Amino acid sequence: MKEAVRQTSEGVVLDLEISPGAKENAVHGYNPWRKRIEVRLSERAQKGKANEQLISFLSDLFHVNSRDVRIITGLTNSKKSLLIVGAKMPEILKLLKENEHKNS
């Protein structure tokens, strides 16, 4: 999972693969071939609803304000990179591992 998370001067960047239209919101795991963390969302990918839900879900998961979660690449793609402003990599990895497969 570490390969999909990197520290920058602004915060932590996550490489994600999003699956919209799932039963629930969850960190589903890590895809070692794509080197991306898989996140499932209940919203469909229509009119930015899945992106809004992704930002809300991750801001709750990482205990940050939603304006500190920014999609930096892949706005209209299932493969996205997000910046968690001001975050530290060890804390983000810990929260991801604690919540992996939660409710799934």
Image (tube, grey):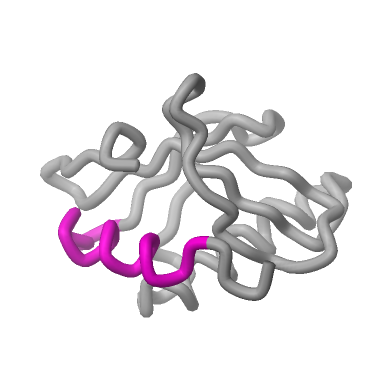
Q: Residue at x 57, y 63 (%)?
A: 101
Furthest residue in direction top, as rendered: 33
Quadrant in the rendering for residue 8: top left
Q: Pick whichever, 57 or 71, lies toward us.
A: 57
Tell whether 86 sits left or right of 28.
Answer: left
Q: Pick whichever, 83 or 91, lies toward us.
A: 91
**Residue 18 drawn at (x, y percent):** 65, 42
Quadrant in the rendering for residue 19: top right
Tell whether 54 sits left or right of 22.
Answer: left
Task: Give the overall secondary structure of the magenta segment.
Answer: helix
Q: Residue at x 36, y 47 (%)?
A: 83
23 is higher (above) or lower (below) than 31: below
Count the marks: how many?
0
**Residue 38 drawn at (x, y percent):** 57, 44
Q: Residue at x 27, y 65 (%)?
A: 94
Quadrant in the rendering for residue 82: top left
Q: Quadrant of the C terminus?
A: bottom right
Furthest residue in direction left, as rendered: 9
Q: Pick whichever, 26 or 56, lies toward us.
A: 26
Q: Residue at x 50, y 22 (%)?
A: 34
Q: Quadrant of the N terminus?
A: top left
* Region of the chain picked out in magenta, as a range: 85-100
**Residue 5 drawn at (x, y percent):** 29, 41
Q: Does the magenta segment cover residue 2?
A: no
53 is higher (above) or lower (below) than 50: below
**Residue 57 drawn at (x, y percent):** 58, 69
Tell whether 36 sits left or right of 84.
Answer: right
Tell whether 29 sits left or right of 44.
Answer: left
31 is higher (above) or lower (below) than 58: above
